[in-house]
Image (spheres, rainbow, N blue to C red):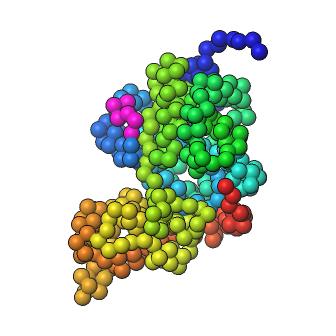
Amino acid sequence: MEENDQTPPSEEMQSLTVTPAASSSSNPTTPQLLSLEERFQLVRSVGEECIQEDELRNLLEKKPLPICYDGFEPSGRMHIAQGVMKTINVNKLTKAGCKMKIWIADWFAQLNNKMGGDLKKIKTVGEYLIEIWKAVGMDIDGDKVEFLWSSDEINSRAHEYWPLVMDIARRNKLPRIMRCVQIMGRSEQDELTAAQIFYPCMQCADIFFLKVLILLLSKMVLYQQADICQLGMDQRKVNVLAREYCDDIKRKNKPIILSHHMLPGLQQGQEKMSKSDPSSSIFMEDEEVEVKTKIKKAYCPPQIVEGNPCLEYIKHIVFPWFNKFKVERNPENGGEKIYESFEELVSDYESGGLHPGDLKPALAKALNMILQPVRDHFSKDPKAKDLLKRVKGYRVTR
């Protein structure tokens, strides 16, 4: 075909001012009670890694409403990292004055053969995910959080999306794309379909494809491109690909990468939770007795902190949620103790002052307190109850 040296499609996606008559709007304001430094520290606390911190500080100083992006494949029941950790992180970001756009990646789940590639089942799982986030306490009031279905968004602006995907694809060699397959839970050694090889180019394009209309100073401002990619460490490589793409097209404003910690599985040596292994994780609608049983069987060696999943749960879920950790013991075993910091708990655990036999029941109790509103919602709300029944009946596929 004849070559046509056109401007890369994403270069055209810059901020612009449009008239108030255009489309719907949200009108959040920058939090008045937080200083720039407080906002920076709050946002930075979300990520185990940030690329780059100076860019993040400049963004928070210059832009009234930074746009954060995360995406989820609807691939089965939601575990506690996707549910509670994500809620903690989103609420931090919105408190700091950011707007969160959550990409319900139904087409991506189909590309990755989740739910056997059945798009109807995938959409059902997506609705279930949203119900959980609402039930557990994600702060979605005032348009702070927007859920977007990838199929709807791409279909509505296909003339923008596919040229962008194609431009990313033609600018990268196959080995570079293959290094990104970790984002799908795959490895470079796996036998991949052509769809799975195309997947990273599409996820990279999502970052530049997002749009949001914000009412600022009585004018509708159209922001295009996510400012912050707030995904897990396992998504890091495709986010770096997006920054490299900015270099290729000479775009100055690169997406900031804020990668959160990956919570490990409950069994020894499990680097991350697995939906195909129910014993490896706590699911958001697990019954109270199931949570107790899973924590009781979890790997938790005495006086060993490194690689201890129970301590990881306390650090990344319990302390951010309650700002404390309460251990109830008989007086002869040390009595009740409330830990005000994770460092204090670690010191006691390493010295033997806190035994796994006391830590585990306290952890199970704290997790059940967090999950109870979700259980209540899925037992009392007819729509949620039906969604859960259907999702539990689906077979998890890779």
Name which residue lies at 57% across and 30% down: 208
Q: Is residue 173 left or right of residue 53?
A: right
- Give the quarter of the image for residue 152: top right
Answer whether residue 35 is visible to the viewer in this image. Answer: no
Q: Is residue 175 left or right of residue 354?
A: right
Q: Quadrant of the C terminus?
A: bottom right
The correct choice, above or below, for 217 with respect to 37 in the image is above
**Image position, residue 389 (x, y; %):** 70, 67
**Image position, residue 258 (x, y; %):** 43, 41
Which residues make up the magenta segment? 50-55
Answer whether residue 232 is visible to the viewer in this image. Answer: yes
Q: Observer-nearest residue: 22 or 356?
A: 356
Name which residue lies at 50% across and 24% down: 246
Q: Observer-nearest residue: 178 or 100?
A: 178
The correct choice, above or below, for 147 with respect to 14 in the image is below
Q: Is residue 319 magenta?
A: no
Q: Quadrant of the N terminus?
A: top right
Give the residue furthest to the bottom: 332
Give the residue furthest to the front: 189
